Image: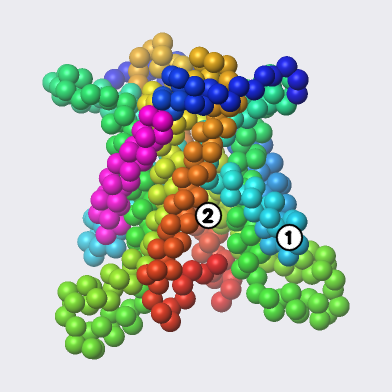
Amino acid sequence: MGGYEFDWSVLWREPYGGWMLQAIFTTIHLSLLGWAIACVFGLIVGTMRVFPSRVARVIGTAYVEIIRNIPYLVQLFMWYFMVPLLLPKNAQMWVNANVPNIPYWTAVICLGVYTASRVAEHLRAGMHSIPSDQYRAAASTGLSTFQAYRYVIIPYGIRIVIPPLTTEFLTCFKNSALAMTIGVMETTGMAYLIDSYTWHGLETTSGAMLVYIFTTTTIVLFMGWVETKISIPGMLGRVR
Amino acid sequence: MDWAVIPKNIYFLLGGLGLTFELAAISIAGGLLVGIIMGLGRVSSRRWIYYPATLYVNFFRSLPLILVIFWFYFLMPFILGRPLGDFLSAVIAFIIFESSYFAEIVRAGIGSIRKEQVFAGYSTGLNYYKTMRHIVIPQALRNMVPSLVTQCVIIFQDTSLAYVIGLKEFLRRTALVDATQFRSIELYSFAAIVYLVFCFAGSMASRRLEKRRGQGRR
């Protein structure tokens, strides 16, 4: 174990400390933007998968199966290296001229599209897990379809999908680290970059680990608190 | 479009696919072994076993795999005093990281066995070890199989991350060929299709096992 001099100051010394803070900030907005896309797409695809129309179901299923069975890194490279070539020449030129920070936006889109397939599956499972008695009970108390959804089905469904969606957000948050492979300087990428300046990769990656652990733990604790706050009396709350 | 780039480099690419399979197989075997030990630790009633196992599992599950790969890449030379090869470094990172996911599957599998089964074991005169060995684990294993297969598919996909420390597995080789041939569309489509074929087969197998398990119970 000898021969290695620790220098933890690479985590806060100028200019590395400032870089690291910026990188943490990038990780946060990258994963939040990806998550926003994932929620919108996931809701659409999840609904398509339970739609009466066969065509919609097939499209929804194909989307989920294809996205889930290709590694995320391969998808990221496809978005970054392949998709621009598929665009018409004019569009390519327009993108190159007008979109600042192309790697970043590529990462956002890829993260969103990828996470959407997983969100869709959880939403679908959530929709299936509401017993049909609930619909009938709502109807029998005289609620209209809209009211039944507004007061019974959606409040019920949200509580079912919150725990899996929390896990999914954390996966999205962790997957944002892969954006470094196309040159986005988020936390992991910055830890690697600072290593190339200082040769203190062990310290920088350990520091990055603390960032991820602190963030995920905070989110888990907060969502646990939310779950107990909004749990319906009489229903089984957190089943652990 | 010029698809000739793929047959021209097929041996180079397939060599990478071989390495991908090798990496996946070793990670699955090692990860499962460590995962079973950690999973049993997670259901232990002894605190000095339960807490370290829980800490281990939660620690690695809250980190991105890519960061864990880097971390071991930097950590191993520090521990050993000399650099460890790309392959071994990646293997160690994969085994440790994936074992935390296997541990959760094992824990859920054991949790799916009802307490009565354990009581029944004790009441027929079996001790703790024999109850585990002959009653709980065989049933738990059967419940776990679909999740284990899914996890194997995920590990197969995860091996592509060894790309970042320069290991010449399938994705790295695809990128290397692209760097000289400039055939991104053909090469990345090919890589995607290859991964899709193997992973889809794995997902289908997992689903069939899940269905069969459901029928066996009735």
Looking at the picture, does residue B196 appear above or below residue B150?
above
Of A101 and A212, nearer the camera is: A212
Of B150 and A120, nearer the camera is: A120
Rendering coords of residue A82 (x, y %): 31, 25
Label 2 SS: helix
Magenta run includes residue A29: yes
| Quadrant hosting residue B7 | top left
Residue occupying image coordinates x 44% and y 34% = A177
Label 1 SS: helix
Q: Earlier in the sequence, mark 2 or mark 1?
A: 1
Q: CA distance from mark 2 to mark 1?
A: 34 Å
Mark number for residue B206? Answer: 2
Which residue lies under the disc numbered 1?
B47
Residue occupying image coordinates x 71% and y 76% = B117
Q: Please name the amino acid that badge 2 sits on.
A: Ser
Q: Which dot, 2 or 1, sits closer to the camera?
A: 1
B158 lies left or right of B23: left
The quarter of the image holding the N terminus of chain B is top left
Of B119 and B213, nearer the camera is: B119
Rendering coords of residue A134 (x, y %): 32, 80
Q: Which residues are magenta?
A: A21-47
Observer able to see residue A58? no
B64 lies left or right of B188: right
Residue occupying image coordinates x 23% and y 65% = A52
